[in-house]
Image: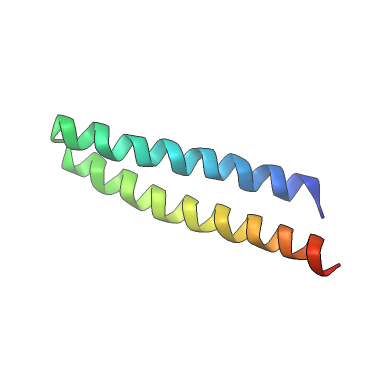
Amino acid sequence: MQVGEFVFGVMMLVVAILSFIAIFREIKNRNFFAVAFATASLLLFGWYSVMTLYSQLMNVFTG
């Protein structure tokens, strides 16, 4: 397992969580452009972080 890739995956997961929070904050403020941008960020960073962490954990368990 490469520690650097695992840490980067966790950092991208934090960005995805912050994007998730931003979606609801911007819905409350009725800023729909920001909602769209936060949703796109959540999808992009969330997918990347989940796949990175999945890949790293599969390397640990399969050798």
The quadrant of the image that shows the N terminus is: bottom right
Q: Is residue 26 left or right of residue 6?
A: left
**Residue at the far front in the pictured view:** 61
Measured as percent of width and height from the top left, residue 53 is found at 65, 55
Residue 40, horizontal then vertical, whole percent: 35, 52
Residue at left offset 55%, top offset 44%? 12
Residue 1 vertical position relative to residue 4 in the rendered view, above or below: below
Quadrant housing residue 30:
top left
The foreground one among 32 and 16 is: 16
Q: Which residue lies furthest to the bottom in this view?
A: 62
Horizontal arrangement in the rendering, residue 27 relative to residue 21 (left or right): left
Residue at 25%, 48% in the rendered image: 36
Point out residue 14 in the picture as x, y percentages from the top left corner: 52, 38
User: Residue 63 at x, y = what percent?
Assistant: 86, 67
Point 39% across, 40% down: residue? 19
> Horizontal placement of 48 versus 52: left or right?
left
